[in-house]
Amino acid sequence: MTISKLVLIELWKRKSQLITGLLAITLGIAVIVAIQSVSVVSEQNVARNLDNLGANILVLPQGASIDNYYTSDIDAPTLPMDYVERILTSTIAGVDNMSPKLTRRVKVNGQSIVLTGILPKSEIASKPLWQSSGLVGAEVKAACAPTESVNKSHGMEDEKLKRKAIDTLLSNDCIAGSQVARLLKLSANSQVTIMGKEFKVVKVLPETGTVDDDRIFANLKDVQHLLGIENQVSAIEIMGCCNAISEGLLSKLRNILPDTRVTTIGQIVSTQIETNQLMKKVTLVMLIIIFFVGGISIGNYIWANVNERKREIGILRMMGAERRTIYKMFLLKALILGVAGGILGFLIGTLAGVILGPYLAGIIVKPVYIYLLWSILLSVAISLAGSLFPTYLAAKFDPHSNLQED
Amino acid sequence: MILQGENILKQYQHNGGLINALDSVSFSVKKGDFVTVTGPSGSGKSTLLLSLFGLIRLTSGNIIFDGKRIDNINDRKLTEIRKKSVGYILQSFALIPYLTTIQNVMIPLALEKVPKKEQYKRASEILDYVGLADRTDHLPRELSVGQQQRVAIARSIVHRPQIIMADEPTGNLDPALSLEILEFLRKINQENKITIIMVTHSPVAAGYGTMKLHLNEGKIVNS
Ligand SMILES: Nc1ncnc2c1ncn2[C@@H]1O[C@H](COP(=O)(O)OP(=O)(O)OP(=O)(O)O)[C@@H](O)[C@H]1O
Ligand SMILES: [Mg+2]
């Protein structure tokens, strides 16, 4: 027999009470874990989008909508091709790479697809996602890695610095997005007719989960010609050095490119970032709430338990149990409750995130196992904090007056 | 002398007035004595029993245990003395309801941090001694009242105390069971030389005393 064993036996014998004691803390932790599991994925998505987008500055015609980066260039007004030249010949520092594009929605075999004209080398060079497709090309080291947190990827830190460029995308060649390839039954080396012109598919891109999957990329010159929009582009993507951006690269670009919107990817995805920040605030508020509600609820449970066991405390004190032993009894119980609440909360929250994530946030949520540790730590802290005062009172009980009850 | 009381005064504040629960109480108990404390209800018997080892603090007076004053020492030292040297038996048995017979008996040993095996050995021996070897895994509510009081006795002696304090140990038992328990206490007293102080209402129980204290309105009437 030990005091710890006594605590365990008591807990076990009264396990039904345990559930009420744990309810608030478990649910609180569950909500936090669920929100966090969802928002961590959402944050990763932002980071991945930023990576996949490649460029971090977008030059668009004045009238273009920027609600969604992926579709902002589709059917947008155009700007002159000369602007690329203008940037290249300017003295503006911090532009690492440029990629002009022209995009239009077209029908191919009755299917609506997005046709994007690109200048091969530069376009590929600022699209790290395409690396895995195995396009031939030299590895180009980015002149400067993004340092702003918003532009930082959370994975593949090293990969990010390596960007492959495609040397050539010949006239009559095209690259198909995975969704388009599936729709039109395209594979490498198959032929496709777009607006009356024959193209050879040189590569099918791996799935990216973005609008790029619905695109066919062809040489910019071909696309301009096909669409009858010579020397116009719908957007210019620019890899800018992050430090340069913060030093006013955007306004310098605006000065030399009249009638354009020069914006950063950061601004465009800021809505998503704002959502994530809101989630963080909600989490913080939840944290404060469960600290109080959970703490008070556990404290209340321990206090009820103390009162129910007044006589037992008196008996133990009579037999020579020190105050310390009484502290130990109730705080150990609170500790066990805390651990149990943390584990349960983590399980429920993770399950909720995994099940509800796809419905509510449209994202696939995976369990984040490190949250188990945090859940337990948080739950134990709350449980102990809530139990301190009732335990203190229990140890202060006068042994004799409690012996005489009943 | 194992235990002495000198001029003990215990006053309770009640509705603005003072009640002298114990008044000028003095006595001496020798090692191995079987002391009975009798007196009418409200005469201060329980107050005396519980104040001797600090469960109730005196208003004034001295208590000397084993040659040392214990009325003026701090709670931790008193707790230590209770743990090592005193066993308590109460009228209501005071068993811990969710622990089995043997677990209840092991509590005093657990408080003294006796190793597990030793605890088990000693608790089993004592339960054998009080005739409950076949009831070790029963919960208190699964025992008869006589058996429950025997568990309480086993618990009060398992840590080999010098003195046992019993407050109406037979108060809840029928005459036959009472006799059984009293014989038990006498056996413990004689075989193990454990001093016993027993509060009782029953003249039969009082008859077991080798030294008799009679209280009336907080005062010792004759001893
Ligand atoms: N906490 C208290 N506050 C006020 N008065 C008390 C308190 N405890 C006991 N008393 C009073 O002290 C006196 C002695 O009480 P005590 O319990 O010692 O009597 P007793 O002899 O054990 O009685 P019984 O035989 O009924 O158990 C009584 O008059 C009682 O009312
Ligand atoms: Mg009494």
Image: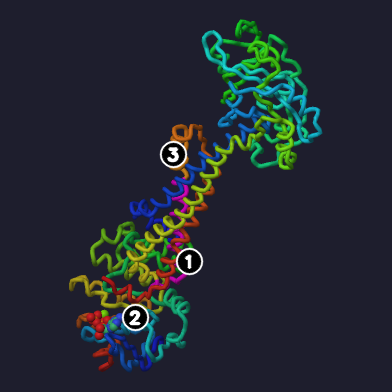
The residue that mark 2 highlights is B50
Q: Is residue B144 left or right of residue A34?
A: left
Queried on whether the Cβ of the residue with tag 2 lies below 8 angstroms from ligand 1, the answer reads: yes
Q: Where residue B10 sits: x, y (%)?
A: 33, 88
Instruction: Name the outermost residue toward the front.
Output: A259
| Amino acid at the residue labelled 2 | Leu
Please report the residue visible at 69 percent of the width from the left and 24 percent of the height from the top: A131
Q: Do the residues at pointers 2 and 3 share their chain?
A: no
Mark 2 crowdedness (10 Å alpha carbons): few <14, some 14-19, many ≥20: some
Check whether the beta carbons of the residues at disc 3 and disc 1 lie within 8 A of each other: no
Q: Quadrant of the N terminus of chain A?
A: bottom left
Percent position of residue B98, x then y: 33, 59
Residue at the image point whose x is 44% and y is 66% from the top: A389
User: Whereabouts is ligand 1, in terms of quadrant?
Assistant: bottom left
Task: Tell me the tag on residue A352.
Answer: 3
For the residue pair B222 and B19, the one nearer the viewer reads as B19
- Quick check: A66 above or below B152? above
Residue A254, given in percent of the width and then of the height, sits at 71, 34
Tell me which amino acid carries mark 1.
Answer: Lys
The residue tagged 1 is B113
Where does the magenta region start and end? A317-345
* Circle 1 crowding by C-alpha within 10 Å: few under 14, some 14–19, many from 20: few
Alpha carbon distance from label 3 to label 1: 46 Å
Which callout, 2 or 3, points to the residue nearer the camera?
A: 3
Given contact means CB atoms under 8 Å apart, are the residues at marks 2 and 3 in contact? Answer: no
Question: What residue lies at 34% left-to-right and 93% top-to-bottom?
Answer: B26
Q: Where B27 sits versus A318, above or below? A: below
* Predominant SS of the magenta segment: helix
Q: Nearer the viewer, residue A250 or A17?
A: A250
Residue type, label 3: Ala
